[in-house]
Image (tube, rainbow, N blue to C red):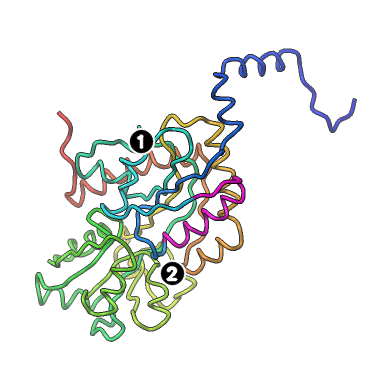
Amino acid sequence: MDPSRPTWTRRAVIGASAGLVALPAFALAQGASYPARPIVLIVPWPAGGQTDITMRILAELAARQLGQPVIVENRPGAAGTMVGPALRLAAPDGYTIAQLPLTLYRAPLQRKVPWDPLRDITPVIQISGVTFGIVVPADSGFRSFADLLAWGRENPGKLTVGSTGVGSTAHLAMEDVLSREGVHYIHVPYKGTADQMLAVASRTLMVGVNSTGFAPYVENGRLRLLAIFSAQRSQRWPQVPTMRELGYPEAVYTSPYGIGVPAGTEAAIVRKLHDAFKAAMFDPLHLRELARYDQEPEYLDTAAYGRYVHDVTARERQLLARIGIVAPRAE
């Protein structure tokens, strides 16, 4: 017997055949022919920001694997949660997919929404996480986070701090720290990274809290990075302390994201999308773009990503309860 060839028992062959017979014929045909037309990838952030840029590169690379264009459609606003209703209403045929920010799973914990990400969305693949930091104008008087705190205490209600939206990770991270310090400030939500960074650089906004979309502004000298919310210092900015080092051991915030489809999408289609985006995320072009924003791939396959979003929802519920931002329970 040739050891390089698999051996099949009669029972295994019968079992495999039975499994195929159990699948609807149209499902098999749909999975086999997918994709037969362009795919829309919803990105819930404005065009030109960090996530939009990396997702466009990812889409182009995945399209090469799939043999069809993957067209990015921006739907900014609501702290990145616009994909929730979009995927709930989309046909589960693999032609509407979306980037899934962590805020998508946080939103139902904060307010009543007509969609449930755990029920209405099937996670396909986790791609990466981000580094969050606190930035100020390059010529700001805040030379350190301690300076920022001192000014905030001396001028209650005057410190303006921006984020990518109410309930975003950036918002909650800063709220957690400043509320512990008793600093009252004005929160200014923005739709995305680009407009917030421009506001800080132009001194319209005193402080910005964002993912590493701030990198180009820090590197060209328009912004100063005071601290980051990662567990360890960044290799890119080794001189910048972490909030943990500054005395906030629980202030470690990342926001892993991935790709999802409407619940009910055929398993064969989910697998094709997973495989295409996995190949794309490890392509050198995408890896170089991630590195520009101090990011690395944080791959989880479909099953592991599904478990993660359930686990993180439970943890987020505890965090929001501690901060005091919780949605009313359904009657």
- Per the image, the residue denoted by label 1 is 118
Q: In the rendered view, would you say 63 is above or below 86? A: below
The residue drawn where x is 38% and y is 57% is 254
User: What x and y, as percent, mark residue 209?
Assistant: 29, 67
Mark carried by residue 233: 2
Q: Amino acid at mark 2?
A: Arg
Q: Secondary structure at mark 2?
A: loop
Please tell me whether residue 56 belongs to the stretch shown in magenta. yes
Marks 2 and 1, how far apart at CA: 33 Å
Magenta residues? Answer: 51-70
Magenta span main SS: helix
- Residue 53 in picture, x, y percent from top left: 45, 62
**Left or right placement of residue 196 versus residue 155 in this view:** right
- Classify 210 as above or below 21: below
Q: Quadrant of residue 135?
A: bottom left
Query: Residue 255: where, in percent of width, then height?
Result: 38, 54
The quarter in which the N terminus is drawn is: top right
Q: In percent of the image, x 20 and y 52: which residue is there?
A: 323
For the C terminus, which image quadrant?
top left
Q: Is residue 106 above or below residue 21?
A: below
Q: Position of residue 109 (x, y in %)?
A: 24, 42
- Bin the neighbour count of mark 2 within 10 Å (Cα to Cα): few under 14, some 14-19, many 20 and up: some
User: What label does residue 292 carry, if any?
Assistant: none
- Which residue is depicted at the point 54% across and 18% down? 24
User: What crowding class fits label 1: few (fewer than 14 Cα within 10 Å), some (14-19), or many (20 or more)?
Assistant: some
* Magenta stretch contains residue 234: no
